[in-house]
Amino acid sequence: MPRPISATIHLGALKNNLAIIRNRVGNSKIWAVVKANAYGHGLRCLWRDLDQADGFALLDFNEAILLREQGWQRPILLLEGFFKPEDLPIIDQYQLTTVVHSYWQLKAIEMANLSRPINVYLKLNSGMNRLGFPAGQYREVLSLARHIRQIGQITLMSHFANADQKEIGVTEQLSVINSVSQGLNIAQCLANSAASLWYPQTHRDWVRPGIALYGASPSGKWKDIADIGLKAVMSLQSEIIAIQHLKAGEKVGYGGKYVASGPIRVGTVACGYADGYPRRAMTGTPVIVDGVRTQVLGAVSMDMLSVDLTPCPQAQIGSSVELWGQNLPVDDVAGIPGTIGYELLCALADRVPVSICR
Ligand SMILES: *Cc1c(COP(=O)(O)O)cnc(C)c1O
Protein backbone atom coordinates (compact mmCIF):
# COMPACT_ATOMS: atom_id res chain seq x y z
CA MET A 1 0.00 0.00 0.00
CA PRO A 2 1.19 3.56 -0.64
CA ARG A 3 1.59 5.91 2.30
CA PRO A 4 -1.98 7.02 3.09
CA ILE A 5 -1.51 10.75 2.40
CA SER A 6 -3.06 12.26 -0.74
CA ALA A 7 -4.47 15.47 -2.14
CA THR A 8 -7.76 15.61 -4.01
CA ILE A 9 -8.54 18.29 -6.59
CA HIS A 10 -12.27 18.97 -6.82
CA LEU A 11 -12.95 20.20 -10.33
CA GLY A 12 -16.61 20.90 -9.61
CA ALA A 13 -15.55 23.37 -6.93
CA LEU A 14 -13.22 25.07 -9.40
CA LYS A 15 -16.02 25.54 -11.94
CA ASN A 16 -18.34 26.75 -9.19
CA ASN A 17 -15.78 29.34 -8.05
CA LEU A 18 -15.19 30.68 -11.55
CA ALA A 19 -18.96 31.02 -12.03
CA ILE A 20 -19.28 32.91 -8.74
CA ILE A 21 -16.51 35.31 -9.71
CA ARG A 22 -18.02 35.75 -13.18
CA ASN A 23 -21.27 36.69 -11.53
CA ARG A 24 -19.60 39.30 -9.35
CA VAL A 25 -17.55 41.00 -12.06
CA GLY A 26 -20.37 41.50 -14.53
CA ASN A 27 -19.10 42.24 -18.00
CA SER A 28 -15.41 42.36 -17.16
CA LYS A 29 -13.35 39.65 -18.81
CA ILE A 30 -11.49 37.23 -16.57
CA TRP A 31 -7.86 36.21 -16.57
CA ALA A 32 -7.77 33.00 -14.52
CA VAL A 33 -4.48 33.26 -12.66
CA VAL A 34 -2.77 29.86 -12.79
CA LYS A 35 0.80 30.76 -11.88
CA ALA A 36 2.84 28.46 -9.64
CA ASN A 37 1.33 25.34 -11.18
CA ALA A 38 -2.17 26.68 -10.55
CA TYR A 39 -1.38 27.59 -6.94
CA GLY A 40 -0.06 24.10 -6.33
CA HIS A 41 -3.15 22.33 -7.72
CA GLY A 42 -1.57 21.10 -10.97
CA LEU A 43 -2.06 23.18 -14.09
CA ARG A 44 -2.09 20.25 -16.48
CA CYS A 45 -5.01 18.53 -14.78
CA LEU A 46 -7.26 21.51 -14.20
CA TRP A 47 -6.94 24.15 -16.91
CA ARG A 48 -9.69 22.59 -19.04
CA ASP A 49 -12.13 23.12 -16.19
CA LEU A 50 -11.33 26.82 -16.31
CA ASP A 51 -11.95 27.11 -20.03
CA GLN A 52 -14.85 29.48 -19.37
CA ALA A 53 -12.22 32.06 -18.43
CA ASP A 54 -11.27 34.58 -21.13
CA GLY A 55 -7.55 34.03 -20.68
CA PHE A 56 -4.90 32.50 -18.46
CA ALA A 57 -2.38 34.57 -16.51
CA LEU A 58 0.89 33.09 -15.28
CA LEU A 59 4.57 33.93 -15.35
CA ASP A 60 6.50 30.84 -16.33
CA PHE A 61 7.22 30.26 -20.01
CA ASN A 62 7.00 26.50 -19.46
CA GLU A 63 3.46 26.84 -18.16
CA ALA A 64 2.47 29.09 -21.07
CA ILE A 65 3.91 26.60 -23.56
CA LEU A 66 2.14 23.72 -21.81
CA LEU A 67 -1.21 25.48 -22.27
CA ARG A 68 -0.53 26.15 -25.95
CA GLU A 69 0.62 22.59 -26.56
CA GLN A 70 -2.51 21.25 -24.85
CA GLY A 71 -4.64 23.32 -27.20
CA TRP A 72 -5.55 26.58 -25.44
CA GLN A 73 -5.88 29.17 -28.20
CA ARG A 74 -7.16 32.23 -26.39
CA PRO A 75 -4.99 34.81 -24.59
CA ILE A 76 -2.17 34.05 -22.16
CA LEU A 77 -0.72 36.87 -20.06
CA LEU A 78 2.81 36.90 -18.63
CA LEU A 79 2.32 38.68 -15.30
CA GLU A 80 6.00 39.41 -14.70
CA GLY A 81 6.73 40.22 -18.30
CA PHE A 82 9.80 38.88 -20.07
CA PHE A 83 13.19 38.64 -18.46
CA LYS A 84 15.65 38.93 -21.36
CA PRO A 85 15.37 40.13 -24.96
CA GLU A 86 15.98 36.49 -25.96
CA ASP A 87 12.51 35.66 -24.58
CA LEU A 88 10.76 37.64 -27.31
CA PRO A 89 10.89 34.89 -29.96
CA ILE A 90 8.96 32.63 -27.54
CA ILE A 91 6.37 35.36 -26.95
CA ASP A 92 6.08 35.70 -30.72
CA GLN A 93 5.90 31.99 -31.44
CA TYR A 94 3.27 31.21 -28.78
CA GLN A 95 1.37 34.50 -29.14
CA LEU A 96 1.65 35.55 -25.53
CA THR A 97 0.55 38.87 -24.09
CA THR A 98 3.27 40.35 -21.93
CA VAL A 99 3.53 42.83 -19.12
CA VAL A 100 5.97 45.64 -19.87
CA HIS A 101 7.23 47.34 -16.74
CA SER A 102 10.62 48.79 -17.70
CA TYR A 103 12.16 50.90 -20.45
CA TRP A 104 14.60 48.19 -21.53
CA GLN A 105 11.63 46.02 -22.46
CA LEU A 106 10.20 48.67 -24.80
CA LYS A 107 13.62 49.01 -26.44
CA ALA A 108 13.91 45.23 -26.77
CA ILE A 109 10.51 44.98 -28.45
CA GLU A 110 11.40 47.81 -30.79
CA MET A 111 14.61 46.05 -31.83
CA ALA A 112 13.08 42.57 -32.12
CA ASN A 113 12.26 40.81 -35.31
CA LEU A 114 8.68 39.65 -34.77
CA SER A 115 6.22 37.93 -37.08
CA ARG A 116 3.38 40.16 -35.85
CA PRO A 117 2.82 42.88 -33.23
CA ILE A 118 2.60 41.66 -29.64
CA ASN A 119 -0.08 42.74 -27.18
CA VAL A 120 1.23 44.50 -24.14
CA TYR A 121 0.06 45.16 -20.57
CA LEU A 122 1.80 48.42 -19.75
CA LYS A 123 2.26 48.40 -16.03
CA LEU A 124 1.63 51.43 -13.89
CA ASN A 125 3.23 51.58 -10.44
CA SER A 126 0.33 53.12 -8.53
CA GLY A 127 1.91 52.66 -5.12
CA MET A 128 2.91 49.06 -4.57
CA ASN A 129 6.46 49.79 -5.71
CA ARG A 130 7.15 46.35 -7.10
CA LEU A 131 6.79 46.60 -10.89
CA GLY A 132 5.77 49.39 -13.21
CA PHE A 133 6.37 52.88 -14.48
CA PRO A 134 5.83 55.72 -12.00
CA ALA A 135 2.62 57.71 -12.42
CA GLY A 136 4.55 60.79 -13.52
CA GLN A 137 6.11 58.97 -16.47
CA TYR A 138 3.19 56.81 -17.55
CA ARG A 139 1.66 58.99 -20.23
CA GLU A 140 5.02 59.59 -21.85
CA VAL A 141 5.80 55.86 -21.81
CA LEU A 142 2.38 55.14 -23.28
CA SER A 143 3.01 57.46 -26.15
CA LEU A 144 6.41 55.85 -26.73
CA ALA A 145 4.77 52.44 -26.76
CA ARG A 146 2.06 53.58 -29.14
CA HIS A 147 4.73 54.54 -31.63
CA ILE A 148 6.39 51.14 -31.62
CA ARG A 149 5.28 49.25 -34.68
CA GLN A 150 5.83 45.81 -33.09
CA ILE A 151 3.36 46.61 -30.31
CA GLY A 152 -0.30 45.73 -30.89
CA GLN A 153 -3.00 46.36 -28.29
CA ILE A 154 -1.97 48.17 -25.11
CA THR A 155 -3.78 47.71 -21.80
CA LEU A 156 -3.15 49.72 -18.65
CA MET A 157 -2.38 47.35 -15.79
CA SER A 158 -1.82 48.05 -12.13
CA HIS A 159 -1.86 45.98 -8.94
CA PHE A 160 -3.25 46.71 -5.46
CA ALA A 161 -1.18 46.23 -2.32
CA ASN A 162 -4.07 46.32 0.17
CA ALA A 163 -7.28 45.23 -1.54
CA ASP A 164 -7.44 42.40 1.00
CA GLN A 165 -7.29 44.74 3.98
CA LYS A 166 -10.59 46.50 4.46
CA GLU A 167 -9.14 49.25 6.66
CA ILE A 168 -6.80 50.37 3.87
CA GLY A 169 -8.46 49.20 0.66
CA VAL A 170 -7.85 50.57 -2.82
CA THR A 171 -8.79 54.25 -2.55
CA GLU A 172 -5.34 55.77 -2.65
CA GLN A 173 -3.99 53.66 -5.49
CA LEU A 174 -7.24 53.97 -7.42
CA SER A 175 -7.02 57.74 -7.35
CA VAL A 176 -3.50 57.53 -8.82
CA ILE A 177 -4.77 55.19 -11.54
CA ASN A 178 -7.79 57.37 -12.30
CA SER A 179 -5.77 60.53 -12.57
CA VAL A 180 -3.13 58.91 -14.83
CA SER A 181 -5.76 57.38 -17.11
CA GLN A 182 -8.12 60.33 -17.25
CA GLY A 183 -9.01 61.09 -20.84
CA LEU A 184 -6.89 58.23 -22.18
CA ASN A 185 -8.66 55.83 -24.44
CA ILE A 186 -7.13 52.66 -23.04
CA ALA A 187 -8.39 49.30 -21.71
CA GLN A 188 -7.63 48.61 -18.05
CA CYS A 189 -6.90 45.59 -15.86
CA LEU A 190 -6.52 46.20 -12.12
CA ALA A 191 -8.25 43.71 -9.85
CA ASN A 192 -6.83 40.63 -8.11
CA SER A 193 -9.22 38.34 -6.17
CA ALA A 194 -9.70 40.75 -3.29
CA ALA A 195 -10.56 43.67 -5.57
CA SER A 196 -12.72 41.43 -7.79
CA LEU A 197 -14.77 40.36 -4.75
CA TRP A 198 -14.93 43.58 -2.76
CA TYR A 199 -14.29 46.62 -4.99
CA PRO A 200 -16.58 46.73 -8.04
CA GLN A 201 -15.15 50.14 -8.97
CA THR A 202 -11.89 48.34 -9.89
CA HIS A 203 -13.38 45.81 -12.30
CA ARG A 204 -12.77 47.73 -15.56
CA ASP A 205 -12.18 45.68 -18.75
CA TRP A 206 -10.38 42.65 -17.29
CA VAL A 207 -9.94 41.23 -13.78
CA ARG A 208 -7.19 38.86 -12.56
CA PRO A 209 -8.46 36.57 -9.78
CA GLY A 210 -6.19 33.83 -8.48
CA ILE A 211 -6.77 32.58 -4.94
CA ALA A 212 -10.57 32.92 -5.07
CA LEU A 213 -10.68 30.41 -7.93
CA TYR A 214 -9.18 27.85 -5.60
CA GLY A 215 -11.66 28.60 -2.84
CA ALA A 216 -9.41 30.30 -0.31
CA SER A 217 -9.64 33.81 1.07
CA PRO A 218 -7.54 36.70 -0.27
CA SER A 219 -7.51 38.15 3.24
CA GLY A 220 -6.35 34.90 4.83
CA LYS A 221 -9.61 34.79 6.81
CA TRP A 222 -12.22 32.29 5.77
CA LYS A 223 -15.00 34.29 7.43
CA ASP A 224 -14.44 37.04 4.87
CA ILE A 225 -15.59 34.73 2.06
CA ALA A 226 -17.73 32.27 4.01
CA ASP A 227 -21.04 33.62 2.71
CA ILE A 228 -20.31 33.96 -1.01
CA GLY A 229 -20.31 30.29 -1.97
CA LEU A 230 -16.68 29.65 -2.88
CA LYS A 231 -15.61 26.06 -2.30
CA ALA A 232 -12.19 24.61 -1.50
CA VAL A 233 -10.68 23.00 -4.59
CA MET A 234 -7.86 21.14 -2.83
CA SER A 235 -8.22 18.85 0.09
CA LEU A 236 -5.27 17.20 1.81
CA GLN A 237 -6.01 14.02 3.66
CA SER A 238 -4.18 11.23 5.45
CA GLU A 239 -4.76 8.67 8.17
CA ILE A 240 -3.94 7.90 11.76
CA ILE A 241 -1.08 5.39 11.63
CA ALA A 242 -0.45 4.99 15.39
CA ILE A 243 -2.03 5.84 18.73
CA GLN A 244 -0.24 6.66 21.99
CA HIS A 245 -1.73 6.83 25.48
CA LEU A 246 -0.04 9.51 27.56
CA LYS A 247 -0.13 10.17 31.29
CA ALA A 248 0.06 13.61 32.88
CA GLY A 249 3.52 15.11 32.38
CA GLU A 250 4.44 13.02 29.31
CA LYS A 251 5.44 14.89 26.17
CA VAL A 252 4.85 14.71 22.42
CA GLY A 253 7.30 15.00 19.53
CA TYR A 254 10.58 16.85 18.96
CA GLY A 255 11.44 19.19 21.78
CA GLY A 256 8.57 17.83 23.88
CA LYS A 257 6.63 20.94 23.04
CA TYR A 258 3.29 19.54 24.18
CA VAL A 259 3.04 18.29 27.74
CA ALA A 260 -0.04 16.25 28.73
CA SER A 261 -1.91 17.75 31.66
CA GLY A 262 -3.77 14.50 32.26
CA PRO A 263 -4.34 11.16 30.53
CA ILE A 264 -4.78 11.74 26.81
CA ARG A 265 -5.01 9.70 23.60
CA VAL A 266 -2.73 11.03 20.87
CA GLY A 267 -2.94 10.03 17.20
CA THR A 268 0.07 10.00 14.88
CA VAL A 269 -0.76 11.17 11.35
CA ALA A 270 1.23 10.39 8.19
CA CYS A 271 1.75 14.02 7.19
CA GLY A 272 4.67 16.33 7.89
CA TYR A 273 6.46 19.36 6.61
CA ALA A 274 8.04 17.37 3.77
CA ASP A 275 4.48 17.00 2.45
CA GLY A 276 3.96 20.74 2.55
CA TYR A 277 2.26 20.96 5.93
CA PRO A 278 3.63 24.04 7.74
CA ARG A 279 6.28 23.21 10.33
CA ARG A 280 5.34 26.31 12.28
CA ALA A 281 1.87 24.92 12.89
CA MET A 282 1.76 23.81 16.50
CA THR A 283 -0.57 22.90 19.32
CA GLY A 284 -3.94 24.40 18.53
CA THR A 285 -3.82 24.18 14.73
CA PRO A 286 -7.17 22.71 13.63
CA VAL A 287 -7.40 19.29 12.00
CA ILE A 288 -10.30 16.94 11.33
CA VAL A 289 -10.14 13.32 12.51
CA ASP A 290 -13.00 10.98 11.62
CA GLY A 291 -15.14 13.98 10.77
CA VAL A 292 -14.51 15.73 14.10
CA ARG A 293 -12.57 18.95 14.48
CA THR A 294 -9.63 18.62 16.85
CA GLN A 295 -6.09 20.01 17.10
CA VAL A 296 -2.43 19.36 16.37
CA LEU A 297 -0.27 18.67 19.43
CA GLY A 298 3.40 19.62 19.69
CA ALA A 299 5.86 20.14 16.83
CA VAL A 300 5.26 18.99 13.25
CA SER A 301 7.98 16.56 12.09
CA MET A 302 9.18 15.96 8.56
CA ASP A 303 6.83 13.04 7.93
CA MET A 304 4.39 12.98 10.82
CA LEU A 305 2.35 15.10 13.15
CA SER A 306 0.39 14.36 16.31
CA VAL A 307 -3.26 15.09 17.03
CA ASP A 308 -5.47 15.21 20.09
CA LEU A 309 -7.98 12.36 20.02
CA THR A 310 -9.96 13.59 23.05
CA PRO A 311 -12.93 14.86 20.97
CA CYS A 312 -12.96 11.68 18.84
CA PRO A 313 -12.82 8.67 21.20
CA GLN A 314 -13.94 6.37 18.37
CA ALA A 315 -10.84 7.17 16.28
CA GLN A 316 -8.49 4.26 15.59
CA ILE A 317 -5.53 3.38 13.43
CA GLY A 318 -6.76 3.93 9.87
CA SER A 319 -9.17 6.72 10.80
CA SER A 320 -9.34 9.47 8.18
CA VAL A 321 -7.66 12.82 8.76
CA GLU A 322 -8.39 16.01 6.81
CA LEU A 323 -5.50 18.48 7.06
CA TRP A 324 -7.42 21.06 5.04
CA GLY A 325 -10.14 21.02 2.40
CA GLN A 326 -13.87 21.15 2.03
CA ASN A 327 -14.56 20.67 5.76
CA LEU A 328 -11.61 22.66 7.09
CA PRO A 329 -10.68 25.90 5.30
CA VAL A 330 -6.97 26.12 4.53
CA ASP A 331 -7.21 29.69 5.85
CA ASP A 332 -8.05 28.36 9.33
CA VAL A 333 -4.95 26.16 9.25
CA ALA A 334 -2.67 28.87 7.88
CA GLY A 335 -3.60 31.43 10.52
CA ILE A 336 -1.98 29.59 13.41
CA PRO A 337 1.52 29.39 11.90
CA GLY A 338 1.07 33.02 10.85
CA THR A 339 0.81 32.49 7.10
CA ILE A 340 -1.95 32.52 4.49
CA GLY A 341 -3.75 29.82 2.52
CA TYR A 342 -1.82 30.79 -0.64
CA GLU A 343 1.46 29.61 0.88
CA LEU A 344 0.12 26.24 2.01
CA LEU A 345 -1.57 25.47 -1.31
CA CYS A 346 1.50 26.44 -3.35
CA ALA A 347 3.78 24.40 -1.10
CA LEU A 348 2.05 21.05 -1.57
CA ALA A 349 5.01 18.72 -2.02
CA ASP A 350 5.68 16.63 -5.10
CA ARG A 351 5.70 13.46 -3.04
CA VAL A 352 1.99 13.81 -2.23
CA PRO A 353 -0.07 11.85 -4.78
CA VAL A 354 -2.85 13.91 -6.33
CA SER A 355 -6.19 12.51 -7.39
CA ILE A 356 -8.76 14.31 -9.47
CA CYS A 357 -12.40 14.42 -8.46
CA ARG A 358 -14.87 15.33 -11.23
C1 LIG B 1 -0.81 36.57 -8.42
C2 LIG B 1 -1.33 37.76 -9.07
C3 LIG B 1 -2.71 37.97 -9.16
C4 LIG B 1 -3.73 37.08 -8.47
O1 LIG B 1 -3.74 37.41 -7.11
P1 LIG B 1 -4.79 36.76 -6.10
O2 LIG B 1 -4.60 37.47 -4.84
O3 LIG B 1 -4.38 35.30 -5.97
O4 LIG B 1 -6.11 36.90 -6.69
C5 LIG B 1 -3.16 39.07 -9.87
N1 LIG B 1 -2.28 39.92 -10.46
C6 LIG B 1 -0.95 39.74 -10.38
C7 LIG B 1 -0.04 40.72 -11.02
C8 LIG B 1 -0.43 38.68 -9.68
O5 LIG B 1 0.89 38.51 -9.60
Image (cartoon, rainbow, N blue to C red):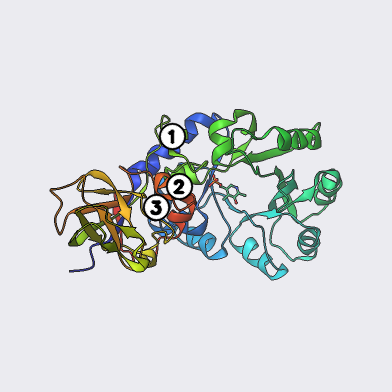
Total labels: the figure holds 3
Q: Nearest to the eye among marks 3 and 2: give it.
A: 2
Name the amino acid type tagged 2: Gly
10 Å crowding of disc 2: few (<14), some (14-19), many (20+): some
**Residue visible at 22% across and 58% down in the picture:** 267
Tag 2 residue: 335
Extreme residue toward the front, this view = 249
Q: Nearer the viewer, residue 151 or 269?
A: 269
Q: Nearest to the eye among marks 2 and 1: give it.
A: 2
Q: Spatial distance from mark 1 to mark 3, Cα to Cα?
A: 26 Å
Dot 3 or dot 2: first in sequence order is 3
Image quadrant in which the N terminus is located? bottom left
Q: Position of residue 309 (x, y in %)?
A: 21, 51
10 Å crowding of disc 3: few (<14), some (14-19), many (20+): some
Q: Helix, strand or loop at disc 2?
A: helix
Dot 2 or dot 1: first in sequence order is 1
**Residue visible at 70% across and 68% down in the picture:** 84
Mark number displayed over residue 223 = 1
Q: Position of residue 39 (x, y in %)?
A: 47, 54
